[in-house]
Image (tube, rainbow, N blue to C red):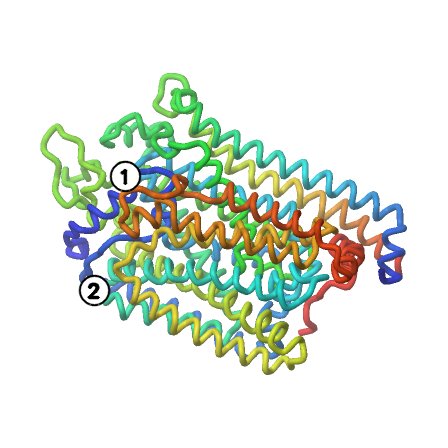
Amino acid sequence: MRAVFTRIASTVAATAAAAGTLVPASVYAAGAVDGAVQKQATNVSAIVMFLVFVLFTLGITYWAARRTKSAKDFYAAGGGITGFQNGLAIAGDYMSAASFLGIAGLVYANGFDGLIYSVGFLVGWPLVLFLIAERLRNLGKYTFADVASYRFKQTPIRTLSACGSLATVTFYLIAQMVGAGKLIQLLFGLDYMVAVIIVGVLMIGYVTFGGMLATTWVQIIKAVLLLSGASFMAFMILAKFGFSPEAMFKAAVDVHPKGVAIMSPGAFVSDPVDTISLGLTLMFGTAGLPHILMRFFTVSDAKEARKSVFYATGFIGYFYILTFIIGFGAIVLILGKDANGAYPFLTAAPAEGVKAAVASVIGGTNMAAIHTAHAVGGDLFFGFISAVAFATILAVVAGLTLAGASAVSHDLYASVFARGRVNEADEIRVSKITTVVIGIVSILLGIAFENQNVAFMVGLAFAIAASTNFPVLLMSMFWGKMTTRGAVMGGAIGLISACVMIALGPTVWKAVLGHPTAIIGYANPGVFSIVLAFAGIWFFSITDNSAQAEKERRDFEDQYVRSQTGLGAEGASAH
Amino acid sequence: MSQSAQRIVNNPKFQELVAKRSAFAWTLSIAMLVIYFGFILLVAFGKEFLGTPIGSGVTTWGMPIGIFTILSAFILTGIYVRRANGEFDELNRQILEETK
């Protein structure tokens, strides 16, 4: 199995460059498998285990397809998912393969700084619970646009929300597809194009035939597999040190070239404004991701919606603690000698008396967790973790595709194009056609972006979610004086300012387009674009004196009562 | 406004529910923001402190503080769900019952 890790010099350089310069700009780089990779020898045990996963999930899809009849079944799994199941599914939606490998890789390369990154991705969840979850569940049906457009003119708000959703989903999908292709090349030894096509075809299959029910179970199974695998790794690592974190940290400090510096914050925070901006984007972006918001309609009521977030926060927080332990374990297991006095996971053994370089790990820093799996669990467990990484990608892209398809079929087709005069069968058909189209487009984009720098795209997706979806959704539920004009103007200002600032900022203008300096110095536009969006909503609402605006303000009370009490809310379907 | 919605708004229990639940949700939100941005500000301006070893070992103060931030997210959601699914939902049930 050692042959699997043949030398990949180019990746080492590329990933090390991404992880080494830890400014906030590159925080998302850790969330994507990036840089050129070389195809590996075919990994048979991983492929067999992955095939078992695929067969099993296709069986579930078949079962789900037979139960998916109405639009409510297709979009919301009939509203019959329990809070605990939904919590697992949300965790499955949120914990991407790239975040598992990326965070472990970050900790491996920089120690403590990896924790700052995990914390940012977690703290949005309590806010989702306190401010959004139950109101969303009480007001909505299938998509967050149902809530955002509740008392407003359908066409403009639905169109804006669908744009926000599709932009978020597309950028997120491209990053996932490119990451998937590279990862599978690295772990399974399959061609990049073959890998991207497999991911695309399977996700079309799950979503078209099984709808939300199949997607939910794929996410639940993946979450259980990933949490079990990561728990086993963390347990084995801690067991090596007699369950003493101090002993583990000591061993890591001894072999890491940065020494004791890995125990304290490093270069992660260079500019406080950028850092606060990043924090805001991560927090509010989480609360504006369409595929996550959609999950709240799969449970029967507000009570279960609250439980979902509680369990999801627990699973995600636990997962981030595990990746932190795995990252430190990786330092010891990769950079230290093994029982035979060799360095099996380095491209070259360091000279006597010199510490091994972080970047000399085979396959680059993103492979740190995978090598660690190999070190603690042998060939079979290594195959298992590789298969889990593949399954993880599938679960995430299936959720994204369903959210994108719903924005088109439920918001654009049923509400805007057909103005509500549409039967369920047609709406589901449009949704399925859209799923196939999104699948094909994302395969093509995945292939087109193979050699592009896509690390900024996850950041862009979060920025758009935080600056468009979140402000409009939040204000529609909390502020009775908001009007259609205010929502559309504010949302559009947020969308445009987030995109423009990222395009002119260091992540795109400098890193992607190759200009020597960025026009805008901040990598994270959040603090500006989010504030602009809220200000826009406020200004264009209070200056709106139309009759329509008066009616919208009067209708708030009804909406308010429903959002607080669930009076008239969508229930679970009968079966 | 619909009749049932009007009846609910006029119910003092509804006013009580909304006031209590909002205050609770905002308090917990602010607690989360303070903890998170407190952590980020420490990372930005308190590197020395976070990098100080606890006792004689290599484990620094940053480690338990970081882990505490993660745990606090989970604990705060737990506190909210416990009260919302118990006390608040019971009040909500009574309101809907009285509206029928």
Kind of residue at disc 2: Thr
Whether labels 2 and 1 belong to a single chain: the reply is yes
The residue mark sitting in front, 2 or 1, is 1
- The one nearer the camera, A379 or A319, is A319
Name the mark on residue A20.
1
Name the residue that disc number 2 marks. Answer: A42
- The one nearer the camera, A472 or A49, is A472
- Identified at 83% across, 43% down, the residue is B16
- Asked whether residue A372 appears in the rendered view, the answer is no
A240 with respect to A358 (left or right): right
Figure quadrant of residue A184:
bottom left
- Where residue A101 appears, x then y in whole percent? 34, 49
- Identified at 74% across, 43% down, the residue is B21
Position of the N terminus of chain A, as image quadrant, is: bottom left
A306 with respect to A461 (left or right): right
Which one is earlier in the sequence, the residue at label 2 or at label 1? Answer: 1
- Indicate the chain on which mark 1 is placed: A
Above or below residue A233? Residue A272 is above
Figure quadrant of residue A250:
top left
A257 with respect to A574 (left or right): left
Kind of residue at disc 1: Gly
- Indicate the chain on which mark 2 is placed: A
Dot 2: element? loop
- Where residue A15 appears, x then y in whole percent? 26, 47
Position of the C terminus of chain A, as image quadrant, is: bottom right
A60 with respect to A130 (left or right): left
Label 2 with label 1: CB-CB less than 8 Å:
no
- Where residue B96 appears, x then y in whole percent? 84, 57
User: Rounded to the nearest whole Å, what is the CA distance between mark 2 and mark 1?
Assistant: 30 Å
Dot 1: element? helix
- Asked whether residue A317 appears in the rendered view, the answer is yes
